[in-house]
């Protein structure tokens, strides 16, 4: 079972991600029982069916070019929203996370998955991700354990962000010299 | 200048620790080349032709003597004894070993310096007027605002992986000396009718392979809201800028494809949510930063120092230097001094460790312990008494830093070019040096007067060739180096892009080409006309005729 970091702890992933193969469509793809994270297109195509599933068993995942505003009114249906990073250097997911947290008020699990690396953990968490799922096999158990520390690379960032309520000049008394 | 508080220092120290661990993991094979690349770039490390290159940030071009001595120490200890000042007011070291970079960054951190975001697809070093705080035409001091923007942009978590690099420049004077029209965001400080400070915001300017002059996206953003406004611009860009094509990924392409009106509407819609949010600046924070930039206690001096006058009258060489390298200061009896790095025997912008130490000493002795780097790649002592100018000149001359050529033919802007840079199509430095050698008659140089020659070794335009009065661009044709020439470009308030005069030239032809362009100007000029003015008045034809007249054998190349 794949592992991920959730609120700073390594946990087993018990969600199944649905992806559409070339020969599958949102309307026809088989949706197994259990906890399921579906692509945005599947949510749109089969909203009624999915909304009827047991509580806390539904999540949705967004690609970098998906617009989070499109699910702004659906957030209560999702126990997980995952944002895909096809390449870690594609920074659109940071804005998606920021919008979900600060504009649309999403409070559930917000997960980064795909090409997710420890060297971006600090930025990801500051933008509102509370779950970080590197690609399966990218890190050994030991490396993943060590990677948790990267979340805290910068202890007092200058800016406010989704996870940091105010900028440094509001949070602290500035000016004490070194 | 700004001094770090405990938090600033902690952030820089944490960055050193982070990069040290990243480099360790890279060298241990735990980080792939692709994974490490953006990390090293955002710490200023390029892999170049011969060795890694380290670009150290000089925020808005301001340096203390202590910092410059540290740069000299780094040049001597980790490099070959010199550094290269860049067109973005930074300094580059061309020969450090990758394994040493974390140590160099740790040394820099001890003098409140770093290499943060000097490369990579993030918000780069903020640049500004090298004469900030001392220029007579300054309306509002840009430095506190640059520092506020520096802190906001440092490790901004949302904007570290943009489609492409992002450059911000700030100007607060009547004359734009920060090239704000050629930046992704150009900020012009101004006051509204009620006297409140704010910013005119230009967006989508830039040079590179698609040079575009920035357009106004907001006429006036009140200072409290400048960070949230910038966040709105960056968010629109981060979400909608192209990521499929490296050459179409800058914000200027997005602005052009949407049109400025639609882009503005998108930014305004985003800003409506962000305005008055947590990023709103407070008077207290701006005041805290601004206390670092208050005018120093300067003496009350006569407007003209008698000894200074006497030296000018009695020493032609000194007078020539004063006429080109010394500018009026806003306070009577003081002067702004430019130390030229431009000389036929060195690469434009290069300074040796010894020269850096000399300049640091002069800064301490004559200029309040501070100096500035200009985007023309020279150094500036901004607070020198007129009565000290002669002594300073004698020392600068002995150190090879008193070439009296600021703003003249030989004050050439050039990127490192093919001698160092992987991207370059052609060499820049030898072309600059050959032109400098051709124009070594000082009287003729001064007679030619104001002219800006800018050289880039490739279309990425680090040498700002588009906005040179004469621009020279290195191009490659079947592995051979050629040079395309533009005339009529300019920076500043009337920023314009130069026009190509015709087929490209070989390196050997270049000094002759420049000589003919200049000769045409000398023949055609009216009194008090600069080269640029003559080009604008009579057009490019007379210049083309002269250059392509006879013995030069132009080589037409693919993209000429």
Image: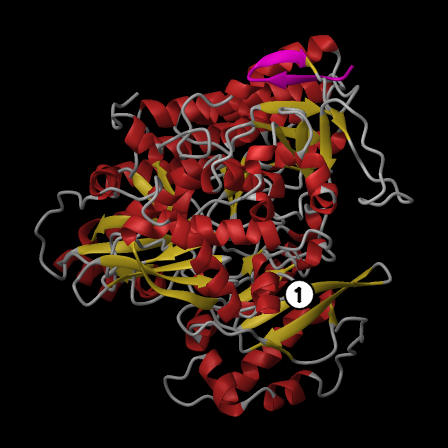
Query: In this rendering, would B445 be left or right of A174?
Result: right
Query: In this rendering, would A63 be left or right of B303?
Result: right
Can the viewer see residue B319 in this picture?
Answer: yes
Can the viewer see residue B440 in this picture?
Answer: no
Q: Position of residue B318 (x, y in %)?
A: 31, 59
Q: Position of residue A15 (x, y in %)?
A: 72, 22
In the image, the segment drawn in magenta is A1-11
Q: Nearer the viewer, residue B523 or B438?
A: B523
Indicate yes or no whether the magenta region holds residue A8: yes
Give the total of numbered labels. Answer: 1
Q: Is residue B462 above or below residue A53?
A: below
Give residue B63's quadrant in the image: top left
Give residue A26's quadrant in the image: top right
Query: In this rendering, would B387 be left or right of B217?
Result: left
> What's the residue at 81%, 45% (across, down)?
A27
> What's the residue at 44%, 26% (across, down)?
B12
Image quadrant occupied by the N terminus of chain B: top left
Using a 10 Å C-alpha cutoff, classify the residue at mark 1 as few (fewer than 14 neighbours), some (14 to 19) or many (20 or more).
many
Q: Is residue B469 above or below residue B50?
A: below
Q: Secondary structure at mark 1?
A: strand
Image quadrant occupied by the C terminus of chain B: bottom right
What colour scheme does the image use? secondary structure
Q: Position of residue B205 (x, y in %)?
A: 52, 63
């Amino acid at each position: 079972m794949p592992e991920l970091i959730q609120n700073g702890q390594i946990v087993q992933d018990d969600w199944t991600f649905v992806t559409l193969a070339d020969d599958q469509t949102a309307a026809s793809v088989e949706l197994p029982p259990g906890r399921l994270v579906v692509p945005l297109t599947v949510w749109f195509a089969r909203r009624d069916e999915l909304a009827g599933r047991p509580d806390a068993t539904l999540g949705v995942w967004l690609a970098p070019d998906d617009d989070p505003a499109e699910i702004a009114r659906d957030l209560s249906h999702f126990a997980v929203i995952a944002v895909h990073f096809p390449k870690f250097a594609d920074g659109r997911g940071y804005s998606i996370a920021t919008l979900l947290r600060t504009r649309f008020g999403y409070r559930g699990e917000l997960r980064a998955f795909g090409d997710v690396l420890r060297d971006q953990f600090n930025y990801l968490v500051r933008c509102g991700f509370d779950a970080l799922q590197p690609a399966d096999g990218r890190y050994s158990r030991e490396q993943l354990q060590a990677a948790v520390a990267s979340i805290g690379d910068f202890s007092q960032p200058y800016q406010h962000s989704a996870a940091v309520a105010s900028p440094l000049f509001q949070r602290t008394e500035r000016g004490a010299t070194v | 200048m700004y001094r770090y508080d405990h938090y600033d220092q902690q952030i820089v120290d944490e960055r050193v620790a982070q990069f040290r661990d990243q480099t360790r993991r890279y060298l241990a094979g735990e980080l792939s080349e692709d994974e490490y690349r953006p990390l090293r770039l955002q710490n200023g490390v390029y892999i170049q032709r011969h060795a890694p290159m380290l670009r150290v940030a000089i925020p808005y071009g301001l340096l203390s003597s202590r910092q410059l001595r540290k740069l000299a120490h780094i040049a001597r200890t980790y490099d070959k004894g010199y550094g290269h000042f860049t067109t973005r007011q930074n300094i580059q070291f061309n020969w450090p070993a990758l394994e040493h970079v974390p140590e160099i960054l740790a040394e820099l951190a001890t003098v409140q310096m770093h290499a943060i975001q000097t490369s990579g697809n993030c918000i780069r070093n903020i640049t500004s007027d090298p004469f900030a705080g001392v220029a007579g035409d300054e309306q509002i001091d840009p430095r506190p605002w640059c520092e506020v923007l520096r802190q906001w942009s440092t490790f901004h978590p949302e904007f570290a992986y943009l489609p492409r690099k992002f450059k911000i420049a700030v100007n607060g004077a009547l004359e734009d000396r920060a090239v704000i029209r050629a930046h992704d965001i150009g900020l012009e400080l101004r006051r509204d009718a009620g006297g409140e400070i704010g910013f005119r915001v230009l967006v989508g300017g830039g040079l590179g392979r698609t040079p575009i002059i920035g357009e106004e996206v907001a006429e006036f953003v009140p200072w409290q809201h400048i960070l949230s406004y910038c966040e709105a611009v960056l968010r629109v860009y981060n979400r909608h800028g192209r990521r499929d094509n490296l050459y179409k990924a800058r914000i200027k392409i997005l602005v052009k494809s949407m049109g400025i009106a639609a882009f503005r509407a998108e930014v305004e819609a985003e800003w409506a949510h962000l305005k008055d949010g947590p990023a709103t600046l407070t008077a207290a924070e701006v005041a805290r930063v601004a206390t670092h930039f208050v005018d120093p206690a300067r003496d009350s001096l006569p407007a003209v120092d008698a000894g200074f006058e006497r030296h000018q009258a009695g020493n032609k060489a000194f007078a020539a230097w004063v006429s080109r390298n010394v500018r009026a200061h806003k306070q009577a009896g003081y002067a702004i001094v430019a130390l030229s790095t431009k000389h036929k025997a060195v690469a434009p912008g290069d300074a040796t460790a010894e020269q850096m130490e000399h300049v640091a000493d002069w800064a301490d002795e004559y200029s309040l312990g501070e100096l500035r780097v200009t985007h023309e790649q020279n150094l500036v002592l901004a607070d020198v008494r007129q009565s000290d100018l002669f002594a300073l000149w004698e020392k600068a001359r002995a150190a090879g830093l008193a070439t009296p050529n600021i703003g003249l033919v030989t004050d050439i802007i050039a990127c490192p070019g093919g001698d160092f840079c992987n991207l370059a199509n052609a060499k820049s430095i030898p072309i600059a040096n050959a032109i400098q050698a051709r124009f070594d008659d000082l009287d003729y140089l001064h007679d030619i007067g104001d002219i800006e020659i800018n050289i880039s070794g490739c279309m990425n335009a680090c040498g700002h060739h588009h906005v040179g009065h004469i621009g020279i661009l290195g191009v490659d044709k079947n592995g051979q180096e050629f040079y395309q020439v533009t005339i009529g470009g300019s920076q500043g308030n009337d920023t314009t892009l130069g026009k190509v005069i015709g087929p490209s030239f070989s390196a050997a032809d270049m000094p002759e080409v420049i000589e003919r362009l200049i000769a045409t100007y000398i023949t055609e000029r009216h009194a008090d006309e600069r080269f640029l003015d003559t080009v604008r008045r009579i057009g490019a034809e007379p210049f083309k005729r002269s250059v392509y007249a006879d013995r030069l054998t132009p080589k037409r190349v693919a993209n000429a």
